Structures are given as structure tokens and as C-alpha cells.
């Protein structure tokens, strides 16, 4: 067994250190202006250490950019996200000395994976340096997963993502410059959409600080809010609710679509099966639940539709905002929201969960199988977006789906062994792996939080968040001996 050189892994983790050292400027600034304690000194120290270590790592390992093996790419992906979670923990520990390391790590990993589950109570009373850090963690995690989905996962053949392979998915030396250009274009689009969202929030009546934080957590489909009531704090301003609904949907669409729209000025990508199917699905679910809520008659029609639209979009896109506790609507609504947790947005978006294209492929496979059973001698080719879907992509989707359910089941069983009730165990496990945020029930539901869970449960949920965010197979493959012998 040949041990892979660690230099490329050190290089990319050094870039992470540099980035985190720079983004710490925002919480440092707020810590200075608040003048409540000496947090700014600790933040500055952390920033300097990150910049120094990152600079040294880049200086002595820069020449390793030219060739990266598959194993090294798996290790880079996993190690970078682990490092982001660890570094994200430190400002919580430094800024809130009463917070345990477990709670700080939970908040950090929930943020960087854009899950949005929280352990904080009285969020509006937290220092602004901490609130801005929570928002920035999710914003970084959002752009990180888009780049991962476009540039890395298709190359690694993870979970059927090769179906969306482009030139930016090829990590050979020949196409590396094109990959860099695509990533840069995605970043520009991400910035533009974030600024647009923040501007509309500001115009709709949010304070500048709230607009900035909520813009970052909306477009990243992360769901961290500056208030215990989540987006329910702004429900008396409908323009904000509908603005958030729009940008949650925009965050759940493929960012390559926006890049092509800007470059080519065409909406041809709207013909993409994934985008059309996703939008039609959202409309159908909103219509069904909206009619059910209006029929219930406990709210005015417009208010009921607003609640339904916002919360359905929030759960499907795995944002995790809430305007109300939708678990008290009806048993039918509760069941619908539970199943919506597993849908997710489009591939190449900031959304988590299973991704909508996998459900489309499952339907196509079922349809082909029924045809094959009806006409045993017939030959039926499975196509998606007018392209033939190869057998290895189908196998990859099936394997991903199986392990997705298996990981949730294992975590849920461990949570049940810890003494948690059925609803809490199942939905906490599901919401961690799907990166949705709130689960169901009184403890982890939309009106609760994760603070009361035992420490070992929080660490297990952190692992679930990371595994789900990295599409499961990216981490599981590292535990197979074959990848190390290859």
C-alpha cells in the first residue's frame, strides 16, 4: 500500500486557513464596536495565526497543484470541511466563554454544512460578532458546496453526480484553468445574488445588520436567523417573507444555470428536466397544502398561503427557516413536511438532502422496469435531458440512496438508545443528514432547539451533518481498503 503525499492536502487546507483568517475581519470589527469585553483581541490572535499558518502552507506546497490523485481529492474534500468546522468552532468558544466545546462545535458544523440546527436560546441577545459569524459560516458553506458539486463530485463519480459533469469537473492539468474560470464565475453570481437579496431585505424594512446576515443565510439555504422566532420575527412584513421565499428557490437552483444565463443571455437551461421538475413539484406541494390550510379556515387565506409557501420552500430547499410551528397544523401537514425533508434542491445548488434529480431518475428506472416486465424482449434506453444514462450512474444513485437511508437509520437507533423519543430520534437523525435544520416534535421541532440533547448525541449529529453534506460516499469510500491500495 502506497501512502499518498500529503502536500496537496496541506496546500488546500492552507487556503482554508487563509480564507478563515480574512473573513474573521467581520466579527473582529463588530467585537471592537461593541466594546463589551476583550473578544476582539482573541479574534485578532486567531486571525493572525490562521494567516501565518495558511501563508506558510501555501508557500511550501504551491508546486503540488499540477497533479492530484483520486485518493488525494477524497482526502482534500473531507479534511477541508473538517477544518472549516473546527475553525468555525473557535470564535464561539472565544466569544462566548460560557459555551461548552460540544455546543460550539455543534453550532459550527451546523453552520458550515448549512444545516441550520441551533443550540442557542435568546439568539437576539447574542453579541453581533457571533451573529455575523454564524451568517458567514453558512455563506461560506453554501458557496463551498456549490463548488464541490460542480468541480469535484462529478469527477469522483459520487451519487450519480457525473450526470452533470462539465469541463470544470475534470481535475487534469489540461482543463484546470477552465475549472478555475467556472468557479470564479459561480462566486461572482453568488455574490451578486447575496447583495440583491440583502438590498431587497433592506428595502422591505429589515435593519442593515439583519439584512446582511439573513441574505447570507437565505441564499446559502442555511437558515440561521438572528431571532429565536426565526423568520416568524418578520411575518408582519409580507414583502420580506415573499422575498425570502424567492431567494431560497434561487439558492436551490443550479448555479451553472446562472453562469450560462449571464454568459449566453439565454434561458435555454430552463428546459432542463431538473429545473422544470423541481419548480413544478414546489408549486404542486404548495397548492395542495395551501388548499388544506385555507379549507381549515383557522387563518385568513393570504396569511395561510404565505405560511405554506414559505415553510414548504424552506424545508424542500433545506433552508430551515420557519414562520410558525407548522407541526400544529394537522397530521397530514406533519407527514408532508417529514417527507419533504428528503427531497432537496437541484444538483449544483446550495441545497442539501437527496437532490431532486435522483427522484426523477428513480421514476424513470421504475417506468423502464415496468415496460421491461410488460415487453420482456423489448429494449428500453433510460434517458435524462436527452442523454443516455449509463449503468454506472444508475448504480451510483442506487448505492447513494441505500446508504443515505442506512445512515439515518443508524443515527436514529443510537439516539433512541440514548433515551430520546421516537419522533425526536427519527427526525433529528433525518434533519442532520438531509441538512434541513429543524426536525419534528417539541424538542427539535420548529419551535424548539437542540440545546437539551446529550453531548454524545450532538457529536453524532455533527457527524451526520458532515456525512450528508459531502454526499455520504465521499467519506465512506475512505473506510474501504481498496481506495488506499489503488
Image: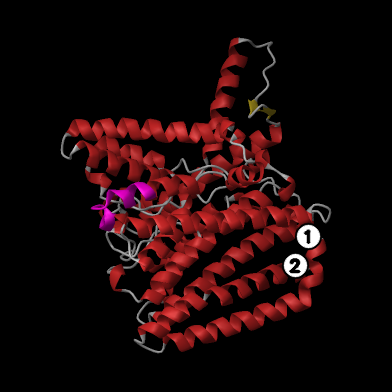
Q: Nearer the viewer, residue 24 or 476?
A: 24
Residue at position x 80%, y 52% in the image: 175
- Left or right relative to 179: residue 295: left
Q: What range is drawn magenta here?
A: 232-243
The residue where tag 1 is placed is 68
Residue sitting at 53 percent across and 87 percent down? 45
Task: Judge from the rendering whether residue 423 lies leftward or rightward of residue 220; answer left or right.
Answer: left
Q: Are marks 2 and 1 in contact (CB under 8 Å)?
A: yes
Query: Which one is nearer the viewer's eye here, 363 or 91?
Result: 91
Instruction: Give the labeled residue for mark 2.
Output: 8
Quarter holding the N terminus is bottom right
Is 52 on the left or on the right of 282, as rendered? right
Rendered image quadrant of residue 10: bottom right
Q: Position of residue 17 (x, y in %)?
A: 62, 74
Q: Is residue 103 visible?
A: no
Secondary structure of the residue carrying numbered label 2: helix
Main SS of the magenta part reads helix
Residue drawn 39% across and 83% down?
33
- Which quadrant of the figure contains the C terminus? bottom right
71 falls in the magenta region: no
Q: CA distance from mark 2 to mark 1?
A: 7 Å
Q: Earlier in the sequence, mark 2 or mark 1?
A: 2
Answer left or right for 214 relative to 361. left
Residue 336 in the image: above or below residue 451: above
Q: Secondary structure at mark 1?
A: loop
Q: Position of residue 61 (x, y in %)?
A: 77, 74
In the displayed structure, 376 sits above or below 93; it is above
Amino acid at each position: 500500500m502506497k501512502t499518498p503525499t500529503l502536500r496537496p492536502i496541506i496546500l488546500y487546507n492552507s487556503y482554508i486557513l487563509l480564507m478563515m483568517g480574512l473573513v474573521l475581519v467581520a466579527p473582529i470589527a463588530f467585537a471592537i464596536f461593541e466594546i463589551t469585553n476583550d473578544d476582539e483581541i482573541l479574534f485578532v490572535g486567531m486571525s493572525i495565526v490562521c494567516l501565518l499558518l495558511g501563508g506558510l502552507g501555501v508557500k511550501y506546497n504551491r508546486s503540488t497543484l499540477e497533479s492530484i490523485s483520486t485518493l488525494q481529492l477524497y482526502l482534500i474534500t473531507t479534511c477541508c470541511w473538517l477544518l472549516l468546522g473546527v475553525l468555525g468552532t473557535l470564535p464561539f468558544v472565544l466569544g462566548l466563554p460560557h459555551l461548552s466545546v460540544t455546543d460550539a462545535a455543534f453550532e459550527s458544523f451546523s453552520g458550515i454544512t448549512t444545516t441550520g440546527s441551533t443550540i442557542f436560546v435568546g439568539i437576539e441577545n447574542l453579541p453581533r460578532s457571533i451573529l455575523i459569524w454564524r451568517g458567514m459560516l453558512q455563506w461560506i458553506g453554501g458557496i463551498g458546496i456549490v463548488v464541490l458539486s460542480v468541480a469535484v463530485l462529478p469527477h469522483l463519480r459520487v451519487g450519480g453526480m457525473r450526470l452533470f459533469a462539465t469541463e470544470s469537473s475534470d481535475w487534469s492539468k489540461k482543463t484546470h484553468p477552465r475549472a478555475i474560470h467556472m468557479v470564479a464565475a459561480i462566486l461572482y453570481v453568488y455574490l451578486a445574488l447575496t447583495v440583491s437579496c440583502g438590498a431587497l431585505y433592506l428595502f422591505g424594512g429589515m435593519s442593515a445588520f439583519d439584512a446582511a446576515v439573513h441574505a447570507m443565510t437565505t441564499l446559502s439555504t442555511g437558515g440561521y436567523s438572528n431571532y429565536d422566532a426565526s423568520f416568524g420575527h418578520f411575518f408582519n412584513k409580507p414583502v420580506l417573507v415573499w422575498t425570502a421565499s424567492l431567494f431560497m428557490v434561487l439558492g436551490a437552483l443550479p448555479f451553472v444555470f446562472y453562469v450560462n444565463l449571464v454568459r449566453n443571455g439565454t434561458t435555454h437551461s430552463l428546459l432542463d428536466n431538473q429545473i422544470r421538475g423541481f419548480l413544478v413539484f414546489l408549486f404542486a406541494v404548495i397548492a395542495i397544502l395551501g388548499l388544506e390550510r385555507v379549507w381549515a379556515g383557522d387563518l385568513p387565506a393570504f396569511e395561510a398561503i404565505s405560511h405554506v409557501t414559505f415553510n414548504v420552500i424552506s424545508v424542500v430547499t433545506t433552508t430551515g427557516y420557519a414562520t410558525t410551528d407548522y407541526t400544529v397544523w394537522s397530521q397530514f401537514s406533519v407527514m408532508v413536511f417529514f417527507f419533504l425533508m428528503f427531497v432537496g434542491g437541484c444538483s449544483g445548488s446550495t441545497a442539501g438532502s437527496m437532490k431532486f434529480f435522483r427522484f426523477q431518475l428513480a421514476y424513470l428506472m421504475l417506468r423502464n422496469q415496468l415496460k421491461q416486465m410488460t415487453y420482456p424482449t423489448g429494449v428500453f434506453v433510460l434517458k435524462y435531458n436527452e442523454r443516455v444514462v449509463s449503468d454506472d450512474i444508475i448504480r451510483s444513485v442506487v448505492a447513494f440512496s441505500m446508504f443515505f437511508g442506512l445512515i439515518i437509520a443508524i443515527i436514529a437507533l443510537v439516539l433512541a438508545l440514548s433515551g430520546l423519543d421516537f419522533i425526536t430520534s427519527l427526525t433529528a437523525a433525518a434533519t442532520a443528514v438531509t441538512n434541513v435544520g429543524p426536525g419534528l416534535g417539541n424538542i427539535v421541532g420548529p419551535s424548539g432547539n437542540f440545546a437539551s440533547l446529550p453531548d454524545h448525541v450532538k457529536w453524532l449529529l455533527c457527524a451526520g451533518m458532515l456525512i450528508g453534506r459531502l454526499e455520504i460516499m465521499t467519506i465512506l469510500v475512505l473506510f474501504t481498503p481498496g481506495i488506499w491500495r489503488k
